[in-house]
Image (cartoon, grey):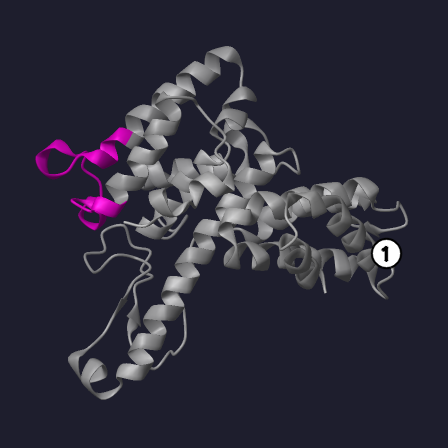
Amino acid sequence: MALSIFNQFHKQGSTAIETAAKALSEHITTAANQQDALSNTQWNLLDFSYKNPQSIDYALRVYHHMSSILPVEVKNDYGFGEDAARRGLAMFFEQQVRPLNPYVNPGDVGEEVVERDWEYEGAEYANATFTRDEVTGNLGKVLQKILNLHEQRMKTIVAWTVEGRAHALGVTKAGTGEKAHLPMHFSGLLKPASLGHNVMSPWSKADFVSGCVGLRAAAKSYLNECSAERQEELLKSWKQEVAEFLLEGDQAAEDAHKKFRDGDFHVKYHAALLLDNLINGPKDETSEDIFSLERWIL
């Protein structure tokens, strides 16, 4: 039901945000189980964003306005009314927005690369490798697995962007400054080896892109929440560390995951977009700008 509300009023443009928010609030308030209805609305916010990434800001504004008018009788583990909606969404981000999980169906073809050993020498994490027999004898399943993995990678990127834009728009905040959920995720992608064994899965291009895009969504807001001194230090650090992803070969920093990114234009491109944001801002980029065709398609 919540997804249909997002979709229905989206077609009417930004002027329908208030109307959509009222419909969403009524849907939650009149539900037999209000807590489940609110939780499902958070999932539907992501579902809508997966299909309409340029309209993430619209969906978040609807949710934000809905939160402000939600009656106090609606409650969950995080509070009543507005607190239930906003704090609940922050916890939803922390619990559900995660690095890529590359396990996709069909499971009887392809081999997922999910090794957690930092010395792993195989193909890039979050990919799937196929045998010649699978490609020639079971092509339909191979193609479906590739499409499913693409969907999983895209959903990861969109989910982190939703979290970043929610922070920038003041909808909810899963932490503040460099200790917020998204910047912590990004820091792990810049220096994966420093996290040690078995803390997170190996470096992945899909996760790196999600970190770059998510940070572009709220770079200014995250930095503004730090002290003036720390802002300067953190901005300098981000610029230097992201710039490393423009280099390759003997010029690039050595780590266990260099082989996965070395020479990859897609990695360079998203690093360049983030650097442009940090150098000429920092900025909080809108979802429409982030997912515009002229900047997204390679």
Quadrant location of residue 111?
A: bottom left
Vertical position of residue 148 compared to residue 295: above or below: below
Within-10-Å neighbours for mark 1: few <14, some 14–19, many 20+: many
Image location of residue 48, percent across then percent down: 58, 57
- Label 1, on which residue? 29
Q: Is residue 259 magenta?
A: yes
Question: Looking at the image, which is closer to me, 49 or 189?
Answer: 49
Q: Amino acid at mark 1?
A: Thr
Image quarter where the N terminus lies is: bottom right
- Residue at (57, 22) in percent of width and height: 225
Q: Residue furthest top?
A: 229
Q: Which residues are magenta?
A: 243-266
Is residue 14 positioned above or below 50 on the image? above
Q: Which residue ends up furthest to the left in the rendered image?
A: 250
Residue at 29% x, 77% y: name it. 142
Instruction: Farthest residue to the bottom: give it.
Output: 137
**Residue closest to the far right:** 73
Q: Is residue 258 magenta?
A: yes
Considering only vertical position in the picture, is 188 above or below 98? above
Q: Camera-side residue: 176 or 266?
A: 266
Residue 58 in the figure: left or right of residue 288: right
Q: Position of residue 215 (x, y in %)?
A: 45, 35
- Left or right? Give the position of 204 relative to 47: left
| Residue beneath the point at 63% across and 50% down | 92
Quarter assignment of residue 46: bottom right
Secondary structure under the numbered disc 1 in the rendered image: helix
In the image, residue 151 lies at what x, y percent? 42, 63
* Image spot of residue 106 (x, y percent): 38, 79
- Do we see residue 184 in this rendering? no
Residue 213 in view of the camera: yes
Quick one: 139 or 19, which is closer to the camera? 19
